[in-house]
Image (tube, grey):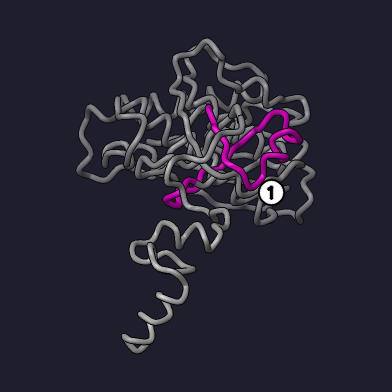
Amino acid sequence: MAKQFEFRLIDGSAPSGQLEADDLIALVQSLKEVATKLGRDETAAELVGRPTKRTQRLAKLNVGLAPGSTRVLLQRTAAGDDALDFDLDEERSFDERFEAIVFSIAADSRPEWVSGSLSIAAGKLRAALAHAAPQVEFTVDGRVQRRFATVETHKQTWLADDSSDEETVHFVGRLRAANLDSHRFQVTDDVGNRVALVDVDEGVQAGRLLGGYVDVVGSPERDAKGRLSHIHRPVIDAAPAPPGSAGVRDAVPLDEILSRAKGPVAGGISDLTEDEAAAFLEAIGR
């Protein structure tokens, strides 16, 4: 039977049993991302692309709210009667590793077995908890396991090591949006693909590139269809406009346009004097 997890959010800004909408969305999204990453690991699924049905079933969550400060209840959806016996080990391992992730967030220590992509997801969960409440109490099957102050946790703990073998992507586009306070940016390429840039260093310098082409290198995050959606901890440099890129061209003088056109050159007819040209035009009714 799947374990039931509970996050009791203590001294948050919302009334007991409630949670601000942005905090709830961030918390649910981060929980789902951690579950999906764990599910991919347990089922040996590919790290990108749409999760398999087996992965989706293992990582499917039910989430609810209850009073008592504010309690966020979390449980994997129970498997149906058609579940196979060999899946039970996966389910137990999933629950144990999820519990270990939360323990690690509380201890502000990243385990060695946590991959780069799972580390990013765990970092988002840490940030969502920290934004929702100054104190969190974590309960498993009705028993309190950990209570911790979110201010004592740090995002640096969950940053992937530079020496890791995590995938790196290279993206070129226009820097279309920038928030220097949150260090979040957005880049759009010439075919309309939009990619969010997260945890941008040197934000002020990058902000000066707003509207221009940039070359971005960083750690990728993909959506359920395997499309690039975010780049974490990107390095941003100015880049030249790609050949044939869309944009406004410099004005071209009329004389230059006419000089390139086929037919008579503006201003006369070659090898004829002005009087001869006038007579010729008059003869053809021009």
Residue 206, magenta (yes or no): yes
Q: Is residue 84 left or right of residue 189?
A: left
Q: Residue at x 31, y 29 (%)?
A: 46
Q: Position of residue 182 (x, y in %)?
A: 72, 41
Identity, as a three-letter code, of the amino acid under mark 1: Thr
Residue 284, magenta (yes or no): no
Q: Which residue is mark 1?
A: 70
Q: Residues within 10 Å of mark 1 (few under 14, many from 20)?
A: many
Q: Position of residue 135 (x, y in %)?
A: 75, 35
Name the quarter where the C terminus is drawn. Answer: bottom left
- In this rendered view, identify the residue nearer to me: 111 or 92: 111
Q: Quadrant of residue 40?
A: top left
Please state the total of marks drawn on the protein image.
1
Q: Can you see residue 150?
A: yes
Q: Specify the segment rendered in magenta.
A: 189-217
Q: Quadrant of residue 84?
A: top left
Residue found at the far bottom of this picture = 285
